[in-house]
Amino acid sequence: MTTAATTAASTSPRFGYWVAFFIFSTITLGATIEAQAHTDRLSPAAQSNQRYAVACATILFLLSIMVVILHTKPLLSSIILGTKIEGFIILVLITFWTALVAIVSDTRHGLATDSSGSIANGNLYYFSWIGLCTGVALMTSFLRSKFGFDLGGELRSRAERLQQWVWAGMLGLVQMGSSARLFDNHCGQQTGLGEAEIGTITFCRRCQLGIVIGIFTAIFSVAIVGFKLGVSRNGKLPWLFTAEIVLSGMIAGGQAGSVGFLTGQEGPAAPLNNLYYSTWGALAVGLVLVGSCVENWSTAKSSLRDGEEGVSLT
């Protein structure tokens, strides 16, 4: 490592994140340009979105390389790094990454996925998501160093299972959004796809199932997160643990029942796509929540049997 890079790494807690961000944006830009050159989606709407994707990837590449270079220039880095300007840059990057992920994952645009929704360009699909996650990690690091707000620590310390409920809510939103997009693309009045790519009745009904399951998973999770955050300020709600058991069981049961329909041969999540990963992810988180609740209940029951007091279930 050069002297400049060593200095940058020692003065900025996010230097490693920015280097990773630059690498991911480079791979994503190259994959986007390659996918655009070889796509079979040639409608005006598809080509317009393909240009938007290239523009987003280019902006991400330029911003990330600019910040990496600034890390090696102490005089210039002091103006941006660790200031609100860096926070604004990170926010802009997250916005462009979100737009890029939405565009390249859409089957109508012929970039990261094909007409069936399966992954056609692995580099573009996976590195666009990895880049978005890196952006979120950058923002979390910035908030912690600038304002002393540790998002991960806050989620872990506020209440038990709060982090898992947040994950369940996010996966439910992805599941709902992916199902809705696939339904609009393949089952709507104006799909933007060829006649041969219109979904069957079974496919469309399973898309609707994914929408419903995703909505309920997101609503249940947001409700529990809200009550848990309220508990940390206003004391304990005696019925909250019961609600956690019931709702986590409903999420796990609903996801277990739907995973076969959604990921089956005629399901919208049969190919590897956003819906596939979010469905299995939501099921896994639901099972973790149920297991944690059962473990807490067993521990509390044993403690009460032994005459111990002050056992908390929330």
Image (cartoon, helix red, strand yellow):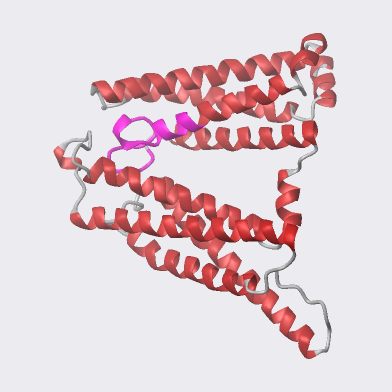
Q: Position of residue 285 (x, y in %)?
A: 56, 60
The correct choice, above or below, for 222 with respect to 26 in the image is: below
Q: In which quarter of the image is the C terminus?
A: bottom right
Q: Position of residue 8 (x, y in %)?
A: 80, 20
Residue 62 occupies which quadrant of the picture?
top right
Name the residue rendered at 68%, 56% in the picture: 229
Q: Of 130 and 164, which appears nearest the observer?
A: 164
Q: Position of residue 224 (x, y in %)?
A: 59, 61
Highlighted magenta segment, given as a residue range: 98-119
- 19 drawn magenta: no
- 113 drawn magenta: yes
Residue 24 occupies which quadrant of the picture?
top right
Lateral position of residue 1 relative to residue 262, left or right: right
Name the residue rendered at 82%, 77% in the picture: 310
Lateral position of residue 228 relative to residue 187, left or right: right
Name the residue rendered at 63%, 22% in the picture: 89
Name the residue rendered at 43%, 45% in the picture: 274
Q: Quadrant of the N terminus?
A: top right
Q: Of 171 and 118, which appears nearest the observer?
A: 171
The correct choice, above or below, for 43 with respect to 203 in the image is: above
Instruction: Find the residue positioned furthest to the front.
Output: 234
The correct choice, above or below, for 22 with respect to 271 in the image is: above
Lateral position of residue 84 relative to residue 78, left or right: left
Q: Position of residue 4 (x, y in %)?
A: 81, 15
